[in-house]
Image (cartoon, grey):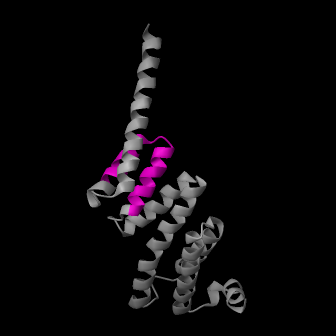
Amino acid sequence: MAFKDSLYNQNLHLMEDEEKIQFAEKHRELGKTYFQNKDVDNAFFHFTQAIKSLILINSKTSSESILLKKNSLLPFLQNNTASCHMLKGNWEHVIDLCNSVLQSEPENVKAFYRRGTAFLEIQEYEKSASDLYAAQALEPENRAVKLKLEILNQRVKKFNQKYATAMKKLFN
């Protein structure tokens, strides 16, 4: 219990940058464990705690080694937080987080897949296709991407059929 208490009762603003990195790493590991155990709420809490500590690292005053650690941890945490949001159906948050990941890691297949899935769920089919095909180009054998593209194609086909029916009614 002492470890857990020490994680929750810390003032991030008072920490040195290295302590913020260590704090983020501890919360990343806890978040991963909770996520693997399907405890999405606790995973989300720990991933966001880690992100908060990293955001407080000043890019102008921190050492290069600290910034490298921050820049390698942050996309991982944002991507995993997006995964938590996916499971809750918070599609706009998924899109925002994946946008951040893709800014720093423009070939991140998971971010393309998650953002493509979010666009699919909010019926932004062209954006979904763009992201899912980008993911497929990076990992042609990715089964999850292939399946999601099949779902996208089915939904687009259904949407086009409904649109065609509506147009017939409109002009008949």
Q: Is residue 136 left or right of residue 90?
A: left
Residue occupying the point 45% across, 72% down: 76
Quarter of the image with the C terminus in it:
top left
Residues 33 and 156: in front is 33
Q: Is residue 151 left or right of residue 28?
A: left
Residue occupying the point 51% across, 43% down: 122
In the image, residue 112 lies at what x, y percent? 39, 58
In the image, residue 144 lies at what x, y percent? 39, 55
Residue occupying the point 45% across, 61% down: 98
Count the labels in the image: 0
- The answer to which quarter of the image holds residue 41 is bottom right
Q: Is residue 161 visible?
A: yes
Residues 155 and 17: in front is 155
Q: Is residue 114 positioned above or below 30 on the image?
A: above
Q: Is residue 160 left or right of residue 39?
A: left
Quarter of the image with the N terminus in it:
bottom right
Say whether residue 113 is magenta: yes
Q: Is residue 6 left or right of residue 150?
A: right
Say whether residue 160 is magenta: no
Residue occupying the point 48% across, 40% down: 123
- The answer to which quarter of the image holds residue 105 is bottom left
Q: Is residue 87 positioned above or below 101 on the image?
A: above
In the image, residue 77 lies at what x, y percent? 50, 72
Which is the main secondary structure of the residues drawn in magenta?
helix
The residue furthest top is 172
Q: Which residues are magenta?
A: 110-134
Q: Is residue 56 visible?
A: no
Q: Is residue 115 positioned above or below 123 on the image?
A: below
